[in-house]
Image (cartoon, rainbow, N blue to C red):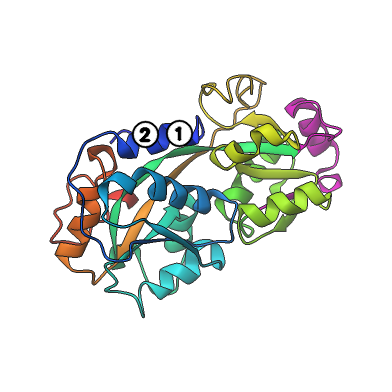
């Protein structure tokens, strides 16, 4: 399955959704649930669906927000009261899957929903304010090595989440203990970005994709992207952590799921609205697909 790179540009991902000329799917009151507050990666994922699927659905896709537990609240809702809601898809990420496999979604597993498809691959990013004292990743890593607790790090996830893991990997690379990281958890990237700009945290462990709307504002800088190689514009000038001498990569899968009791007809309508690269592989519409989680 090929992924669009969400971090390259918002337009690239929406083009990947909108390119094929499919007939419109009849979906009443289509909705994309972003399981966090506005401004983060889940918001971006739903905006991609909203824009990219516009030519393929009979009505505009509405974006709603459902913060809580990095997707856990939404996952529980769509496994209890909205299990057969054929009008809604829910954005998920690698962090959502981590929550599921570590039991943060209760007794529900990856087999309890229907996976619609993927929106693309995103990458981790080390972000600071424009006026930060750190000119590059090396300066931050030096402080991590000398005294990890001297740097206040924040992200949209709890300890043990994928965003925490980005910081933990950097600390390990700096020969420091991740347990010594001074970490502040937020319920989504939008909240963490707001606090970064307010000066209460010094470093944000975020994603490249969610930086797209902020590039021209001049309020933040990306010290490094955690992709295997440099990205294209508008991030072509941002070095990877690898090329700066630090062996850290982090790729984020993003996509959509529906309630496990959604009818085959409703499920197929969403699948048909998506171009082939986003359709689940080896997953007939008559079964619950776990293709995105394998």
Q: Nearer the viewer, residue 84 or 216?
A: 216
Q: Residue at x 32, y 66 (%)?
A: 29
What percent of the width, then of the height, locates residue 91? 42, 56
Q: Secondary structure at mark 1?
A: helix
In this picture, which residue range is highlighted in magenta?
A: 129-155
- Which disc number belongs to residue 11? 1
Please give left or right for residue 227 compared with residue 145 in the image. left
- Quarter where residue 135 is shown: top right
Please give left or right for residue 251 compared with residue 260 in the image. right
Please give left or right for residue 163 compared with residue 132 in the image. left
Res 244 visible: yes
- In the picture of the structure, the residue carrying the numbered disc 2 is 15
Q: Is residue 149 above or below residue 211?
A: below
Q: Is residue 119 above or below residue 159?
A: above
What percent of the width, then of the height, locates residue 243? 62, 19
Q: Nearer the viewer, residue 212 or 195?
A: 212
Residue pushed farthest bottom? 81
Quadrant where the N terminus is found in the figure: top left
Query: Residue 143 lies in magenta, yes or no?
Result: yes
Query: Residue 159 lies in magenta, yes or no?
Result: no
Q: Nearer the viewer, residue 145 or 83?
A: 83
């Amino acid at each position: 399955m090929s992924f669009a790179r969400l971090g390259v540009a918002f337009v690239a991902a929406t083009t990947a959704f909108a390119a094929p000329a499919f007939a419109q799917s009849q979906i009443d009151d289509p909705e994309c649930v972003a399981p966090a507050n506005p401004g983060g990666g889940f918001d971006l994922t739903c905006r991609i669906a909203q824009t990219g699927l516009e030519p393929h659905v009979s009505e505009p896709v509405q974006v709603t927000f459902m913060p809580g537990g990095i997707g856990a609240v939404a996952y529980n809702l769509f496994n209890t009261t909205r299990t057969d809601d054929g009008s809604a898809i829910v954005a998920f990420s690698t962090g959502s899957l981590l929550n599921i496999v570590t039991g943060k979604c209760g007794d529900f597993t990856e087999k309890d929903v229907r996976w619609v498809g993927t929106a693309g691959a995103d990458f981790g990013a080390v972000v600071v304010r424009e006026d930060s004292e750190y000119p590059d990743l090396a300066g931050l890593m030096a402080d991590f090595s000398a005294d990890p607790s001297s740097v206040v790090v924040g992200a949209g996830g709890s300890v043990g989440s994928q965003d925490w893991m980005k910081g933990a990997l950097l600390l390990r690379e700096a020969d420091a203990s991740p347990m010594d990281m001074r970490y502040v958890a937020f319920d989504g990237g939008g909240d963490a970005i707001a606090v970064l700009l307010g000066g209460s945290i010094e470093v944000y462990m975020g994603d490249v994709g969610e930086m797209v709307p902020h590039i021209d504002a001049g309020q933040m800088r990306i010290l490094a992207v955690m992709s295997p190689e440099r990205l294209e514009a508008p991030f072509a000038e941002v070095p990877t952590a690898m090329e700066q001498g630090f062996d850290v990569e982090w790729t984020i899968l993003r996509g959509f799921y529906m309630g496990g009791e959604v009818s085959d007809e409703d499920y197929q309508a969403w699948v048909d609205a998506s171009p082939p690269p986003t359709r689940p592989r080896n997953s007939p519409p008559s079964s619950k697909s776990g293709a995105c989680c394998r």
